[in-house]
Image: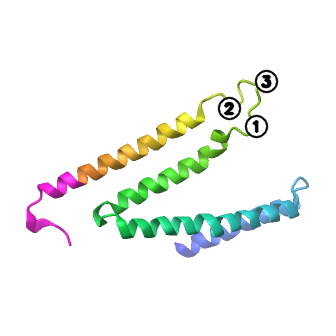
Amino acid sequence: MRRALVLLGVVVMGYAIVGGLTDPDVSPIKQGVFLVAVLIVHDGILLPIAIGIGALTTRYAPERVRGILRAALFASAVVTAVALPLVLGRGRRPDIPSALPLNYPRGLLIVLGAIWIAAAIAIAWREQRRRRRPSGAHRS
């Protein structure tokens, strides 16, 4: 199964590369610069931040809540990354009211609040279950 998935990935990437190189509207130099910039931002900024946050949660968060905490942090990062262009409002024009018509910062805060409320509920539920167990039933 793994080999089939790797082969499928190679075929799809080959199709994308051939399509990009043969499309007259694609500038290979601009695309190459973009890909290098994405690589630098990911490997030079985002990945070290993610590793640092993971190390901090490992060091300071109790083991029983680490998974929930990491899931909430990951969901928060993904939602923020997706919403950031809308929150910044680039491209918003006053003469076109239908372009970016919503209050995106408020929406982002609502979604982040929902993520962290759900995490708090999950942690509270887990703590309550842990307290109800007999003392000999705790996992080490």
Secondary structure category for the residue under label 3: loop
Give the residue at x 72% y 24%: 97
Type of amino acid at the residue the image marks with label 3? Asp
Task: Residue 42 in the image: state x and y as whole percent.
Answer: 64, 65
The residue under label 3 is 95
The C terminus appears in which quarter of the rendering?
Answer: bottom left
Type of amino acid at the residue the image marks with label 2? Leu
Q: Which contiguous range is marked in magenta?
A: 127-140
The front one of 120 and 13 is: 120
Give the residue at x 61% y 72%: 6
Left or right relative to 63: residue 72? right
Left or right relative to 35: residue 82? left
Task: Residue 22 in the image: state x and y as whole percent.
Answer: 88, 61
> Can you say whether 103 is above or below 51 in the image?
above
Q: Residues within 10 Å of mark 3 (few under 14, many from 20)?
A: few
Gap in Å between the C-alphas at discs 1 and 3? 11 Å
Gap in Å between the C-alphas at discs 1 and 2? 8 Å
Type of amino acid at the residue the image marks with label 1? Gly
Name the magenta segment's main secondary structure. helix
Residue furthest to the right in view is: 24
The numbered dot on residue 59 is: none
Give the residue at x 70% y 25%: 98
The front one of 140 and 2 is: 140
